[in-house]
Amino acid sequence: MTIKFRIVDVNHKERQLIVRFFSDLLPESELVAEYAADGRTPVAYRTDYAITVPIPAPEGVELAAFIMQYCPVDWFDLKHAVLDPSIPTPMPIVAIGQVVNGSPLQPPPTLGELKAAKNEEINAWRARANLSTFPFAGKHFSCDTLSRSDIDAVANHIALFGTYPDGFPGGWKTVDNSIFPLPDIDAFRDLFASMTAQGTENFNHSQHLKEQLEAAETPEAVEAIRW
């Protein structure tokens, strides 16, 4: 296969060459894209390219090499393959007229992939529950990262010294911004036990959901699992 080109026009103002590429198998006569009203005079070719010439302009062999950089070699290779009866070039099976979403088509996730994703979701639900609130004596107490660090600090001080730390305010702030009295360390232990019990309940609930997940046999059953 030999690809050739012809310079068919020059636009000096835009520093452009209009170049037509063709080959032995695809001569210019086979590359006409549009004819004039007379039906015989070509007015556009599929392989006409406007190429901007750099400064300084290449000449001779360098100009030919520069122009060939713009040659649609892959397109010519494809067209030549179609013309060669010895090369199989089947087209994909398509439904003409069918409207298809232009997004790349991805295979649906397998049941195993859905279960793995749901397992991670259950872990995330449990983590959020552990960092939300816990009930105690008719009130709710925050258990976010900051609150939990404060609770653990007081619990560690009690474990080490058997007393509240200096400056302890004598109570703990609830979610509704009231102060719940904790007059002695036994009261604090009861508060801490409630927090621990809530964490255990969260764990048990997550395990129950994972048992449901293990038994799920359809994508719909996996999707139906909620905290």
Image (cartoon, helix red, strand yellow):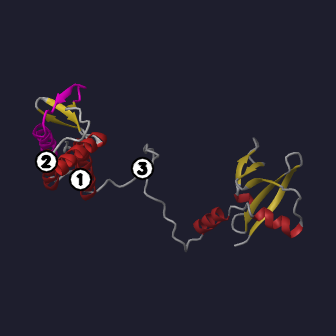
Q: How crowded is mark 3: few (under 14 residues within 10 Å), some or many (20 or more)?
A: few
Which secondary structure lies at badge 2?
helix
Decide which of tag 3 and tag 1 comes sooner along the chain: 3
Q: Which corner quadrant of the image does residue 5 belong to?
A: bottom right
Which secondary structure lies at badge 3?
loop
Q: Locate the N terminus and report the quarter of the image it occupies.
A: bottom right
Residue identified by numbered label 2 = 200
Q: Residues within 10 Å of mark 1 (few under 14, many from 20)?
A: some
Q: Pinpoint residue 122: horizontal percent, then vertical percent.
A: 23, 48
Seen from the viewer's position, the closer of residues 179 and 42 is: 179
Residue type beneath disc 3: Ala
Distance Cα–Cα, label 3 vs label 2: 56 Å
Q: Report the side of 198 relative to 88 (left or right).
A: left
| Residue at x 17% of width, y 43% of height | 163
Q: Pinpoint residue 98: horizontal percent, then vertical percent.
A: 42, 44
Residue identified by numbered label 3 = 95
Q: How crowded is mark 2: few (under 14 residues within 10 Å), some or many (20 or more)?
A: few
Distance Cα–Cα, label 2 vs label 1: 18 Å
Residue identified by numbered label 1 = 119
Does residue 78 lie above or below 138 as drawn? Answer: below
Region rendered in magenta:
174-200
Judge depth for marks 2 and 1 and give the one in front.
2
Q: Can residue 224 be seen in this view?
A: yes
Decide which of tag 2 and tag 1 comes sooner along the chain: 1
Seen from the viewer's position, the closer of residues 35 and 63 is: 63
Distance Cα–Cα, label 3 vs label 1: 39 Å
| Residue at x 85% of width, y 52% of height | 9
Which secondary structure lies at badge 1?
helix
Does residue 114 lie above or below 82 as drawn? Answer: above
Judge depth for marks 3 and 1 and give the one in front.
1
Is 17 a magenta residue? no
